[in-house]
Each structure stands twice: as C-alpha cells, then as structure tokens.
Image (cartoon, rainbow, N blue to C red):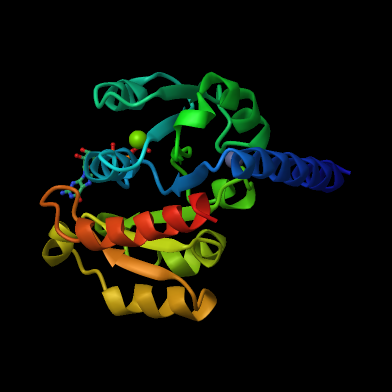
Amino acid sequence: MEIKVVHQIMEWNEDVSDEVKKKLTEKRVCLVNVMGSPGAGKTSLITSVIKQLSETLSIGVIEGDIAGAIDAEKMKALGVPVVQLNTDGACHIEAMSIQHILPDFDLDKLDVIFVENIGNLVCPAEFNIGEDIRIALLSIPEGDDKVEKYPLMFRTTDALVLNKYDMISYFDFDELRVTQNAQAINPDISIFNVSNKSGDGLNSFNAWLRSRIEEKINA
Ligand SMILES: Nc1nc2c(ncn2[C@@H]2O[C@H](COP(=O)(O)OP(=O)(O)OP(=O)(O)O)[C@@H](O)[C@H]2O)c(=O)[nH]1
Ligand SMILES: [Mg+2]
Ligand SMILES: [Zn+2]
C-alpha cells in the first residue's frame, strides 16, 4: 500500500514535470537541475557559472533548501532574480514546487533558470522537475565510490562535475574508478574536473553548458 502511494505521487510528478517543461519551452527558457551532496559545491558552481555566462545569457535561480535563505542571499548579491524555495524538511524538490514558483519570474526576459536542488545524492534524481539539463556534482572529499553507491544520480545526469579537484592530492581518490563507472552506466555522460576555488576547469564546463542551453533556447 505504501509503495503504491509513492508510485502514484511519482506518476503525478511526471505529469507536472511535463507541464513545466512545456511552459518553459514555449517561453524558450532552459531549466538546469543542479544536484549533489550537502557541501559538494552546488552554490559555488552556480555562482561561477553566473559570473561567466551572465554577459550573454539572462539567468534566474531557484534555491532549494530545507530551511533558510543563505544561498539565495548569495545569488541576490550577484544581481540575478532568485527565489528561495524551502521544502520544510523534504529532501528533494518536486515539479509542483517549480510550477508554483515560475510566475515569480518574468519568463519573457530569461534564457535559463538554475535550480539548486536539496543536498542529497538519492531522491533528487528520482523526481523530474521539468529540467532540460541535469548536472550532478561529486566533490573529491566525498570519495570515489559514490557512483557505485548512488547509481541513479549518475545514470540520469547529463554532466558529472568532479568538484574540489584542487584537493585531489590530499585524498585517495581514484579518478579512473569514478569515470569508468559513470561511463559504464551512462555512456553519454560529460565529465568535467572543476575547482571552484582556483577556477580550473570552469571554462570547458561553461562552454559545454552554454552550448546545451543555446541548443534549447534556439530550437
Ligand atoms: N577547496 C575547494 N572548496 C570548494 C570548492 N567548491 C566549493 N568549495 C567550498 O565548499 C563549501 C561548500 O560549498 P557550497 O557551494 O556551499 O556547497 P553546496 O553544495 O551549495 O552546499 P549545500 O547548499 O549546503 O548543499 C564552501 O566552503 C565552499 O567554499 C572547490 O572547488 N574547492
Ligand atoms: Mg548550496
Ligand atoms: Zn527526498
């Protein structure tokens, strides 16, 4: 009984996700779902992307957190429209929440909305939110076994960002283990080594992201 209820909710989520995607496609806005563990560097990455891409793309942000507005304040300081979504305990964002928030943005003026999902490698991957692009972060200190332990996250993502790459010499992190396991379950995955501290790797990640966004908004 319990499982059935969850299944129905997820089916319903899929319908709403499709509605969100349709609406955003009409408006030529690309939705990017940024996922990863607490502290993996989601806010840092979105901040870096905004700094590099906002000259040519009009960017908005939905900040998902269980509580508080710490990350939204950081985005606001960059001068982009931002809405803080508090899930009040829930460990992922659902499409319905995005649907409720969209009227807060002037969609005619935006090219892309980044959604920072709740810090969690599990259920955010189970719930589509109408996104066009999925980005999964894995930071070096989290360990090289995460692709095997949380396969759905890495199987369903478009890009894997290995963040905090500046720390690789301090950890026993077998990069080949991660990349081979990710490619085995997700042959089309794009993998980027990034440091949001030094900026290394951001140019190539941003070039990939820009071309994916432009593909959507110019379609
Ligand atoms: N050394 C290093 N530190 C980083 C890097 N990226 C982020 N950090 C640091 O890691 C910490 C967490 O980064 P956030 O961007 O807040 O992580 P988050 O995924 O948004 O965290 P939550 O929103 O709490 O889930 C901060 O202290 C960042 O300064 C990196 O590439 N290298
Ligand atoms: Mg954050
Ligand atoms: Zn959850």
Q: Residue at x 55, y 26 (%)?
A: 87
- Residue 31 lies, with reference to residue 153, above or below; the image says above
Report the side of 42 relative to 55 (left or right).
right
Report if residue 214 is visible in the image.
yes
Residue shown at the point (59%, 22%) measured from the top left: 103
Q: Foreground: 45 or 66?
A: 45
| Ligand 1: quadrant of the figure | top left
Q: Nearer the viewer, residue 123 or 108?
A: 108
Residue 179 coordinates in the image, percent (x, y): 36, 75
Looking at the image, is 77 positioned above or below residue 172? Answer: above
Image point 63% across, 41% down: which residue? 26
Give the image location of residue 135, x and y in percent.
Answer: 43, 54
Q: Position of residue 150 (x, y in %)?
A: 51, 61
**Total number of numbered labels?**
0
Viewer-side residue, 11 vs 132: 132
On the image, the x and y values in percent for residue 60 come to 41, 32
Residue at horizontal 55 percent and vertical 36 percent from the top: 91
Q: Which quadrant is the C terminus positioned in?
A: bottom right
**Left or right of 123 in this view: 68:** left
Which residue sits furthest right? 1
